[in-house]
Image (cartoon, rainbow, N blue to C red):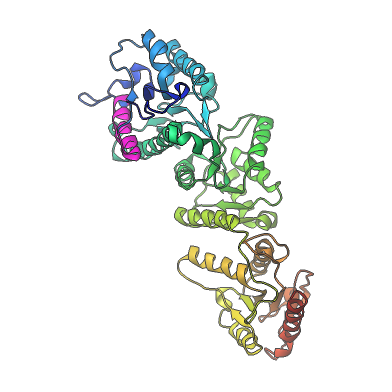
Amino acid sequence: MSLLGEEDQSPAMAFDNDLLISYAHLDDEALLEGQPGWVTELHRILEIRVGQLLGHKPRIWRDPKLQGNDYFADTILAERLPNVAALLTVLSPRYVQSEWCVREVERFVQESEKKGGLRIADKARVFKVVKTPVPLARHPQSLQPLLGYEFYVTDPQTGRARELSQAFGPDAERQFLTRLDDLAYDICQLLQMLAPEGEAAAASAEPRATVYLADTSADLKEERESLRRDLLRNGYRVLPDGPLPLVAAELAAYVQEQLASSALAVHLVGRGYGVVPDGDSRSVVAIQHDLATQRQGLPRLIWLPPGLAIDDERQRAFVEHLRTAPGVHAAAELLEVPLEDLKSRVHLELERKESKAEPAVAAGKSGPLRIYVICDQQDLEASRTLEGSLFDHGFEAVLPVFDEDEAQARLEHEESLRTCDAAIVFHGAASELWLRRKLREIQKSGGQTSDGLGRERPLLLQGIYLAPPLDAAKERFRTLEAMVLREPAGGFSDAVVEPFLAEVRRRQGAGA
């Protein structure tokens, strides 16, 4: 009896096997004497892992008895394929050369349309395992739109691909098992959707949100897959859901379409420049970033691995642009933190979008108003006089938290921005660049709009407190976005902050 069972099941969804492995038999020849072939090992471990995830043994079938590279049993076409829930193809140079392997794919696609369709919700019933890299144009046509599972790594120095196998050492074996686990998880999800009790759920299943996880350079493929896997397993949809076109005009149209349905864009930027498509001088990494910046209102996170060392001059210039260009930081957040901290930040951003309906601080709330005093760590002590003055005037003053755990400190900062009634940026020893960055963070938090960080209403007021050391730049500083408070030459005075506090009270009363 198959996973899908036979009782209470319509004929259109009845399957004898859960998965059929389609492969060229040359690819199952063992590299080392006495060891199992690559496909045999894939089959063995996949059966165990899918069974562990399902709770019972799946029906995974392949024909190990066929001899000869192009020999094909008609019974597979006539009997097996019409009655299998999903097809797993093991792509290699030999596979795409085999007329029979290609016929197997085409026949499954035809038969699948008779039994539930080729896609169930957002899941395809064909799994493309790429054992050895083959140009996309040579993939069977039905497989070209699929992203696939790459069971090889590319040496960044030589450009040569090496298959993931225990024959190549413990690290290659570890990566093989990691990617097989991803594959097993996705197969399990599909089979559960195809089960009778899963049909209704599959038809109505909606992802929590859609994330555009930009394609990246080869050196960050593993990190991207780790984040992608994490998002998928938490119920999010991840785009792009197909290979990126390598012609500039087609690439732009494809990326724009995928960004349009995304709630968040995440860009992983590494040391490699990445592929440059025909018709453009920029890499696909840079193009995706530039297209995302054009979508107003789309939150973006840009991640650089800590300690990033870059040899490519083009990539060095691109990363410098990301770090310093004001336009980049106006609508995106640049993170140089460990990968696990990036994952936390991505989930926080998505969870905030899901909880936008939560009530924030109301205009007529009871209790003291909260003013967030934003300062750099080197100005923390200097800002305490201002903190004390706010407290003496009946306000709850909040200072930033500085902790060795940068990710946690960042979360505390954003929580204060979300819940405070007003904010004052204390600008002392920190640079003007730091000041501008903090003003942009206030804007993105909802300081000027009702959007961002889950705020229900804008800040009542924001101010900039200009403290020593005073210089020409501070003397010239002007802005229409905040009330500017200048510390007198003789030191702090309550008279400087009183107009700000009076205006906060007036606005709070007007909105009550």
Q: Is residue 50 magenta?
A: yes
Q: In the rendered image, is residue 88 in sight?
A: no
Q: Which residue lies furthest to the left in this view?
A: 34
Q: Residue at x 73, y 73 (%)?
A: 473
Which residue is depicted at the point 69% across and 52% down? 297
* Residue sitting nearer the eye, 432 or 98: 98
Q: Which residue is drawn at 35% across and 33% down?
A: 164
Can residue 468 be seen here?
yes
- Number of disc labels: 0
Q: Position of residue 212 (x, y in %)?
A: 58, 44
Q: Quadrant of the N terminus?
A: top left
The answer to whether residue 209 is above or below residue 182 is below
Q: What stretch is highlighted in magenta?
A: 39-56
54 up-or-down from 479: above or below: above
Q: In which quarter of the image is the C terminus?
A: bottom right
Q: Is the magenta stretch mostly helix, strand or loop?
A: helix
Residue 399 as seen in the image, left or right of residue 485: left
Q: Residue 122: x and y, percent? A: 53, 35
Using the image as rendered, state which of residue 10 and residue 265 is in the foreground.
10
Residue at the image point whose x is 47% and y is 48% from the top: 234
- Magenta highlight on residue 255: no
Q: In which quarter of the image is residue 504?
A: bottom right
Image location of residue 219, percent across then percent down:
47, 42
Of 153 and 354, the residue lying toward us:
354
Q: In which quarter of the image is residue 387?
A: bottom right
Image vertical order of residue 170 relative to residue 433, above or below: above
Q: List x then y, in percent, for residue 113.
A: 52, 20
Q: In this view, does 40 lie to the left or right of 81?
A: left
